Amino acid sequence: MRILALETTEKTGSVAAMCDGKLLLEIELNRQQRSAQSLAPGLQALLRQLQWRPRDIDLVAVCIGPGSFTGLRVGVAAAKAFAYAANAEVLGVGTLEVIAARAPGQIQSISVAVDAQRGDVVAQSFRRNDAGRLCPEAAARLLDIDTWLAAIQPDTVVSGPVLQKLAGRVPEHVMVLERQYREPRAAALAQLAARDYAAGRRDDIWSLSPHYCRRSAAEEKAEG
């Protein structure tokens, strides 16, 4: 079972390859470029280093949001096009779940948030179950940043790329996860996709679409 994972929910991203549950390679996309420019070269480098042909891939996994409007569109469109051309299956995984999955094993409860702009975040809480998996406690919600921070319980760790812009605003009783764990990565995406695929979950290549937290400013302006 060969899995190709594409993660482009922020301005840059990463790609990874997994075979039969073993992570083979992860490549970080060029941080000097947006994913629209860096994704194709990153994919080419990954396939070249592994000596994989597109038709060797069984499943294409992709983060479906929330995240950057452009990044999500680029990633999902690329995943669907690649899967169609390679006759592979496609599976979307939520960005917040991918970030949560990167937390160290001793973390029992975590709240993950991404920047939704305009003073808001999209946040979701996870708690580790008896099998060791961080499971969602409720659906992701669009919240004011201060509302999210005020609701954090003392035993809950916070994570997510939005924390890079919140220096000094996080309450003292809240533990902030180390920076290296806060971003979604293709390796974690591949692991979650392998687990979900083994459990029988599938996505339709034609209907799979990004999950945005809100309409873009341009869309709201056009309607206003």
Image (cartoon, rainbow, N blue to C red):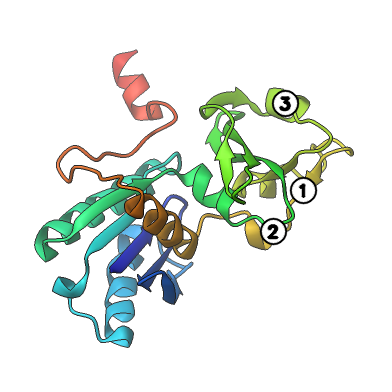
Front one among 116 and 196: 196
Of circles 3 and 1, the one toward us is 1
Picture coordinates of residue 122 (x, y %)?
Answer: 55, 32
Numbered label attached to residue 176 = 1
Q: Where the C terminus falls, by quadrant?
A: top left
Label 2 secondary element: helix
What amino acid type should be assigned to the residue bearing mark 2?
Arg
Query: Which residue of the protein is positioned furthest toward the top in this rendering?
Result: 224
Disc 3 or 1, which lies upstream in sequence? 3
Dot 3 alpha-carbon crowd within 10 angstroms: few under 14, some 14 to 19, many 20 or more: few
Front one among 196 and 158: 196
Mark 1–mark 2 Cα distance, whole angstroms, equals 8 Å
Label 1 secondary element: strand
Q: Residue at x 56, y 53 (%)?
A: 101
* Number of residue marks: 3
Label 3 secondary element: helix
Q: Is residue 125 left or right of residue 178?
A: left
Q: Residue at x 24, y 52 (%)?
A: 90
What amino acid type should be assigned to the residue bearing mark 3?
Asp
Mark 3–mark 1 Cα distance, whole angstroms, equals 15 Å
Q: Is residue 52 left or right of residue 30?
A: left
Judge whether residue 9 can be spotted in this image: yes
- Which residue lies under the disc numbered 2? 179
Picture coordinates of residue 147 (x, y %)?
Answer: 70, 22
- Which residue lies under the disc numbered 3? 146
Q: Residue at x 49, y 60 (%)?
A: 188
Above or below for 208 versus 120: below
Q: Look at the numbered discs 1 and 2 and tell me whether their residues touch, using CB distance below 8 Å.
A: no
Picture coordinates of residue 183 (x, y %)?
Answer: 57, 55
Dot 2 alpha-carbon crowd within 10 angstroms: few under 14, some 14 to 19, many 20 or more: few
Disc 3 or 2, which lies upstream in sequence? 3
Dot 1 alpha-carbon crowd within 10 angstroms: few under 14, some 14 to 19, many 20 or more: some
